[in-house]
């Protein structure tokens, strides 16, 4: 890559005499001057702390410069833990922010931002970061409903126009062993894909009790995984990784229709389980007859599997994860992968900084991260309503899960009744939440 382009990428496309992106300071890139990047962390839970470790490990000329979380103790705890691991590279004095608007202060202070907050907030911080000309690592999923996904698509396009790096937390796309198999699939080793089995069947995840000082909205934010407006439901938040492998195999072309079924069998009664399901299955259809079969659940003491398997006109991929075996139609082994050491969480951040510093072409993962998330939303809505829905209708939907306002005193889309019980969507009845202009 030539020096002019490298310099242009590093400066976040924020130059042009300082006229296009006001309020941004040009940073030196010449020999003898610092190329240090200020990194901001938005969302200081386990994944956020992990992303901060990955990013500081990936590029020695970075420092953590600002953090934000909905809850101040979580932000402070993350900072203290990171200081122990990265002595001298944590410089956040006066830049630890709490609340639901702290993301703006982090973005304003930094060159690179890590978006690791609850998915229901992610489209807002992505939009703001891109508008301000900042490079982004954006965790999965990128939204919880169609209005948010459309916003992400717009932000992704804007990032392209500005020459910004946008790396997705759909980390299997960066795993060396998974890439090895998927590249063979895309090269046609098994012919045209006829069907796929996409699974993510595991046990239940965490719940968190409310604190005495919490408003209803903040209590739900504290226990965010268990509310659709914040997590997208468990299939969007978790199964999106496997759905993305299906999208990947189809050359990132989304399905045209989907129908499915799901419900709650173990997540019952206790209010901390919120309003999400614990099991879903769906069928994604393509015009040529290709069918992707999706199975996901989070129930304890059940058989589990996390994998993607593909059938084609010439053969099969019996396992994308694990052994990574490709056979012909008669079962003869055509290829069996020899796994190599591969830390996908580290690799995605290494590529992030190679892109930012102009060592490789600018990365923008916005297209597939939006489509994969939308597949999860499409499946959820098919299961919630009992309808067969099209991609176009799902993406154009105005159904919103947003609260009345993004503040601690806002009203969530689903609030407990006088007995402390939440509405849960029932197929065939399909409780439709209110639509809120974004």
Image (tube, rainbow, N blue to C red):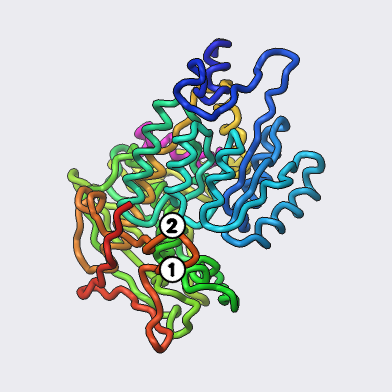
Dot 1 and dot 2 residues touching (CB under 8 Å): yes
The extreme bottom residue here reads 419
Residue matched to label 2: 120
Q: Is residue 342 visible?
A: no
In the image, residue 169 sits, relative to residue 351, either above or below, namely below
What residue lies at 37% left-to-right and 60% top-to-bottom?
402
Instruction: Choose between 420 and 232: the one closer to the eye.
Output: 420
Instruction: Report the disc number at residue 157.
Output: none
Instruction: Choose between 205 and 159: the one closer to the eye.
Output: 159
Would you say residue 48 sits in the magenta stretch? no
The quadrant of the picture occupied by the N terminus is top right
Q: Secondary structure at mark 2?
A: helix
What residue lies at 52% left-to-right and 38% top-to-bottom?
136
Residue 269 at x, y percent in the picture: 44, 85
Q: Main secondary structure of the magenta part?
A: helix
Q: Please tell me how many numbered marks the rendered image carries.
A: 2
Answer left or right for 153 relative to 96: left
Where residue 425 sits, quadrant-wise, is bottom left
Residue 286 at x, y percent in the picture: 22, 47
Would you say residue 189 sits in the magenta stretch? yes
Answer left or right for 38 relative to 413: right
What residue lies at 39% left-to-right and 38% top-to-bottom?
155
Residue 70 at x, y percent in the picture: 57, 59
Q: Which residues are magenta?
A: 173-190
Residue matched to label 1: 227
Q: Residues within 10 Å of mark 2 (few under 14, many from 20)?
A: many
In the image, residue 128 sits, relative to residue 30, either above or below, namely below
Answer left or right for 418 relative to 214: left
What residue lies at 57% left-to-right and 23% top-to-bottom?
10
Q: Residues within 10 Å of mark 1 (few under 14, many from 20)?
A: many
Q: Secondary structure at mark 1?
A: loop
- Alpha carbon separation for disc pair 1 and 2: 10 Å
């Amino acid at each position: 890559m030539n020096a002019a382009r490298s310099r242009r990428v590093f400066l976040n496309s924020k130059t042009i005499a300082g006229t296009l992106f006001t309020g941004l300071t040009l940073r030196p890139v010449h020999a003898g001057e610092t190329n240090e990047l200020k990194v901001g962390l938005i969302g200081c839970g386990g994944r956020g702390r992990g992303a901060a470790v990955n990013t500081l490990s990936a590029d020695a000329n970075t420092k953590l410069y600002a953090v934000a979380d909905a809850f101040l103790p979580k932000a402070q705890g993350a900072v203290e833990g990171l200081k122990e691991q990265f002595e001298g590279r944590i410089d956040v004095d006066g830049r630890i922010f709490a609340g639901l608007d702290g993301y703006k202060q982090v973005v304003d202070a930094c060159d690179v931002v890590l978006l690791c907050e609850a998915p229901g907030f992610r489209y807002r911080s992505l939009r703001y970061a891109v508008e301000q000309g900042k490079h982004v690592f954006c965790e999965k999923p990128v939204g919880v409903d169609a209005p948010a996904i459309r916003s992400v698509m717009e932000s992704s396009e804007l990032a392209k126009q500005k020459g910004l790096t946008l790396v997705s937390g759909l980390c299997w796309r960066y795993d060396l062993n998974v890439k090895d198999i998927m590249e063979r699939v895309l090269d046609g080793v098994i012919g045209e894909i006829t069907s796929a089995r996409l699974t993510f069947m595991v046990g239940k995840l965490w719940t968190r009790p409310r604190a005495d000082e919490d408003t209803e909205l903040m209590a739900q934010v504290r226990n965010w995984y268990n509310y659709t407006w914040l997590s997208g439901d468990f299939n969007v938040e978790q199964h999106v990784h496997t759905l993305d492998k299906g999208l990947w195999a189809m050359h990132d072309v989304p399905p045209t229709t989907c129908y499915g079924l799901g419900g709650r069998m173990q997540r019952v009664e206790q209010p901390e389980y919120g309003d999400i399901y614990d099991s879903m299955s769906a069928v994604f259809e393509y015009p040529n007859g290709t069918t992707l079969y999706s199975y996901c659940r989070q129930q304890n003491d059940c058989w589990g599997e996390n994998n993607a398997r593909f059938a084609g006109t010439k053969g099969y991929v019996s396992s994308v994860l694990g052994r990574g075996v490709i056979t012909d139609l008669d079962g003869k082994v055509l290829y069996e992968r020899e796994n190599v050491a591969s830390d996908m969480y580290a690799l995605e951040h290494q590529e992030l900084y190679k892109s930012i510093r102009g060592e490789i072409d600018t990365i923008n993962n916005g297209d597939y991260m939006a489509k994969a998330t939308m597949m999860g939303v499409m499946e959820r809505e098919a299961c919630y309503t009992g309808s067969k829905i099209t991609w176009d209708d799902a993406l154009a939907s105005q159904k919103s899960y947003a609260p009345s306002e993004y503040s601690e005193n806002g009203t969530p889309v689903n609030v407990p009744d006088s007995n402390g019980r939440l509405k849960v969507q029932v197929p065939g009845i399909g409780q439709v939440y209110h639509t809120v202009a974004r």
